[in-house]
Amino acid sequence: MTATLDTPRTTTRAKKAPVRRELPTTAQVFDPAVPTPPSAAAHLTEAQVAELAAELDTIRAEVIASLGQKDAAYIHRIIKLQRGLEIGGRGALLFSLLPPAWIAGTAALTVAKILDNMELGHNILHGQWDWMRDEKIHSTTWEWDHATPAASWQKSHNYEHHTFTNVRGKDRDLGYAVMRITPEQEWKPADLIQPLTNVALSLFFEWGIAIYDVELEKVQAGIKPWEEAKGELRTLWRKARKQLAKDYLLFPLLSGPGFLSTVAANFTANALRNVWTHAVIFCGHFPDGTETFEEDRLEGETQGEWYVRQMLGSANLTGGPLFHLMTGNLSHQIEHHLFPDVPSNHYARIAPKVQEICERYGLPYTAGPLPKQYAKVVRKIVRLAFPGGGPKTA
Amino acid sequence: MGVLSSIGQLARDAAARFTQPLLPDDLLGTLSPLWSTTQPHARVVGLRRETADTTTLLLRPGVRRPTHRAGQFVGIGLQVHGVWQWRTYSVTSRPGDEHLAVTVTAVPGGAVSGLLAHRTPVGALLRIGPPAGEFVLPEPTPEKLLFLAAGSGITPIMGMLRELYATRPEALDGAVVVHCDRTPADLVFGLELRAMTASTGLRLVERHTALEGRLTGDALTDDVPDWTARQAWACGPAGLLDALTEQWERHGDPDALHIERFTPPTLAADGATGGRVAFTTSGIDTDAAPGEPLMAAGEAAGALLPSGCRMGICHTCVGTLRSGAVRDLRTGDLYDTPGESVRTCVSGAAGDVEIEL
């Protein structure tokens, strides 16, 4: 209880969480014999890290103080755009037997689903828009067009992934429990198929995330009781069956003779959304240049060290404003990881400041276009399907 | 529930399968906020300047029209710098009127009242909450009525007077309104009240406090000698209401005095030591400073809490106390029984506390 009382007033949930809850754990096994390359932040002194934290705090405070009507108008505009595209797309698909209607409808629905999941769902569920006190646009009430219920995803993502980003043994997003994504992970023969696993995961990413949130690998490892997982699977099914009914039964029925072609269109929209979100998300933490960290690091980690870990563990994608919107501004992964609850429409503006800070402190600021970054991720997945892959020892 | 409404419910349930995870209402609300039934909105269709600092806003509600009783208040939500701010205002129009009217006095230093009174144009959209309040006339209407108002305290009383004037003008015959404000020019609804007296037999006592001083018990006896024989409705600043309560307790029948407090209470930190506050439904923990209302602490930490008047009147903000103790910041009373309802806007933490909200 004293620990609770001593906790200073904090503004983000991600940061205060580790003090108050039991640490999570992954079921992954790591090989202590694999040497970890020295961190790119090894040259920073404690005082420098503290200065860096103060500079980042200033950026955050400046954005929070600036929030106002323009931002509220922005999120309402995106919500309107998303709903308009969805209604338009599903409307066109009522006539899905006509090829132009099929193409236009599928395209509009794909974009609507991407906006729903990325710029709206992901960011609203992070609490980026809670400051408006609008009970419909709030992290505690928002639901999204995704198989996994918002609340289940929030736990695995907001808390575990954002707090323990790239900490081996703590961040389950490192390989999503089905892949070997760092050389420190012990190689198993099953890893040989991971290039194929990646293709499948990409196509069915929505379902991958949904099942992933139930943490079945922990049940297998005996860390999590099966009863608990069963309850979560039931919750998942309650949400998922409605999603399935909507895309693969109700709207196809409305299309009458176009039933099957609407099923195909909705499947295509879901799959395209899956491939896109998978690519963007995998480029956030896995490309070359991002670091993973040892668990010891968490002990007494300061705010500045937390910031440094977030910067070194994340990578940005470069592109224009439309590209950033379609990635839900996760193209600004570094800024998002520094300030997960700062409204996403501000990331582009603060990115040059963050980059300048990185340069001044001699820290890498990993960024590149999507095809290049994704190629690096695939290369890594293929390489790590085989034993080894760690840094060459001299 | 009639057959029609059951069919309506079935249709809504069916539509929700197509719109899930959204509700059909969410889509309607996106097309026009006025069509939302879950977040009712109203459009400002007219403004009437009552005095230099008081404006009546005429509102046309959307599809969900609130039905109030004369004397009740509604929550009005205004988006200020992107943030929804809620305040409660008495409805000054009659239940049967085409438009819903609220009359707003700009409070010096008030963040919301000034914007509503002076800087809300015709055409603006406001959110509107459900009507509430016990400050209403009983059925049947008592024979001898007395209304006591000071400043904007006239607003709920004006709602009652207009309703009586339109439906039972005979009830106003012999009734007395004592209305206090600094000067004749400050008297909200002065003209309309004077006109009412001419056609009904209502007696209006105007008290201009800049000259005559505040209303006291003795002054009341001078103005309305038979006050003890009347059912009284009073609304105004806390000082006046305290004085009247004392007057009725000492010389009259306390049950005959009905009061509406419409001014922010003075909050004292005595005994509200602060502590860790857990809002269990929202899953948010935060620290409440000594004397800080739980609601203020929760909102600062990003919790979405129900809120209304923010002065302990409307009970919109109540949450159930799960553990710990809270202190009413107005009275200093301690509440520590689990399961008790707590008004978060006027309660401070007395140590660590858990609230189901």
Image (spheres, helix red, strand yellow):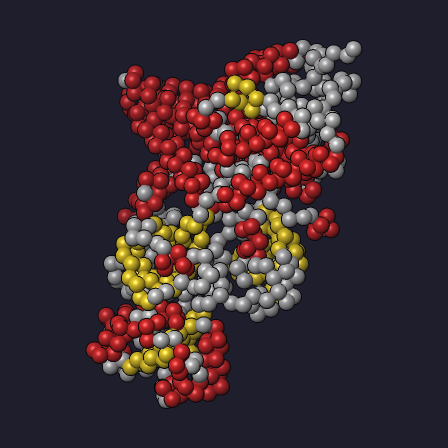
Give the tally of numbered discs: 0
Question: Which residue is at the front of the view, B209 or A234?
Answer: B209
The residue furthest front is A360
Question: Which residue is at the front of the view, B134 or B62?
Answer: B62
Point 60% across, 12% down: residue = A379
B16 with respect to A192 (left or right): left
The residue furthest left is B199
Quarter of the image with the C terminus of chain A is top right
Percent x, y of residue B138: 35, 73
Residue B301 visible here = yes
Question: Which residue is at the front of the view, B128 or A156?
Answer: B128
A199 with respect to B113 (left or right): right
Percent x, y of residue A18: 68, 39
Residue B326, by quadrant, is: bottom right
Point 37% across, 79% down: residue = B208
Residue A234 visible here = no
Vertical placement of residue A389 versus B100, above or below? above
Residue A242, by quadrant, is: top left
Percent x, y of residue A82: 39, 32
Point 49% across, 57% down: residue = B317
Point 35% across, 68% down: residue = B155
Percent x, y of residue B222: 38, 89
Residue A30, by quadrant, is: top right
Question: Which residue is at the front of the view, A191 or B300?
Answer: B300
Vertical placement of residue B83 versus B107, above or below? above
